[in-house]
Amino acid sequence: MPNRPKRFWIFIILLILAVYSLVVLRGLTESTRRSLLLRDETEAADRVYISIVTTNANPATHELTAQVSFRLAGKIAKDEVTPAVDLHLLINNFRGEQEFDFPKDKRMNRIEVVFPLNGDLNKYPLDRYDTTVRLLMTTPARNERPESPSVPANITQHTHPTDELAVSPTALLQNAPVALSISLTASVPGIRFTGNVSRGSSQEPTGIELHLTRANSVIAVSLIVVLMMTALSMSLLAMAIRAITTVERTDLLPLSVSISLIFGLPALRNIQPGVPPVGALVDYVTFIWAELMVAASAVIIVWTWLLRTRPKS
């Protein structure tokens, strides 16, 4: 019997160490579960290999930033990075130019582009975002261009209003599409990526559909913080209720705890990774109510002390 409490605490310590070690080991491979690697090859001999690497995803500004680099193969290549023909790239860049010209015999340098994220930040940490990367690369057609090209009925304007990208049929008649091989690497801490490559006809832009959610580790941390804020505020409220129901002298310890928590809860809230400013849905569920309960507890303790304390005659 005397050794039972000691064994109990040893078991608790070992359990905490086991949970901590499991979390650390799982964190070492966390990037593999949230990252995305897409490859979509074409069998065409004359092709451009486009590599897209995401560098930042910011749900607060609804922007996804990526670096785009190019490699050439076939007759359109003078060497791996220098085209033998003029190339024209159309991409749904959210900020800056959407059209890039790569003259022949000049190196194709890497470019930085920004894509729009469509989602609702208010649903943190269960918010979801979608975006589509659209690419079309062309080269001037070898045949002679007519002065006033007539547009066949079967060629329509390809428009993607959500991405602000449109390809006119006149441009498709005057230029020949270039086959593209796509490689996309998406890895940003705190964000989990899924997606796929969609291809239409050779005259349509190649689309890369991306879906972004918070990483499981971020969701777990957010839920733990929410539960801790709720538990702290309700525990303090219970202390305040006990203070007003007891007939003994009012204990001011709950008052000091409540004042500390009024400033401590915002700090606890802000340890959530990527948490938006106050006003998200999760704040109306937990944080704001927790602050109100803490403030109410302080008011209860103060007025209990005022009503019970009588000046000495």
Image (cartoon, helix red, strand yellow):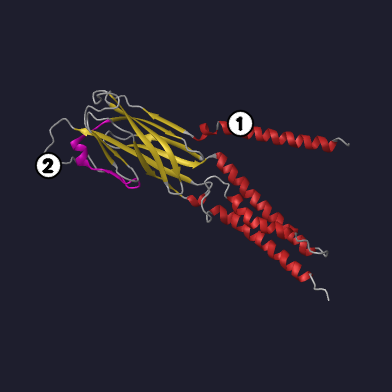
Mark with earlier residue (1, 2): 1
Q: Which residue is mark 1?
A: 25
Give the farthest residue toward the front.
313
Q: Quadrant of residue 42?
A: top left
Is residue 55 part of the magenta span, yes or no? no
Magenta-tinted stretch: 158-178
Is residue 303 visible in this depiction of the protein?
yes
Quadrant including the N terminus: top right
Q: Position of residue 82 (x, y in %)?
A: 26, 27
176 in magenta? yes
State the residue at coordinates (84%, 36%): 4
Q: How many marks?
A: 2
- Asked whether, in this view, residue 51 is left or right of residue 254, the answer is left
Say which amino acid is labelled 2.
Ser
Residue at the limit of the structure toward the left, as seen here: 147
Identify the residue under disc 2.
Answer: 148
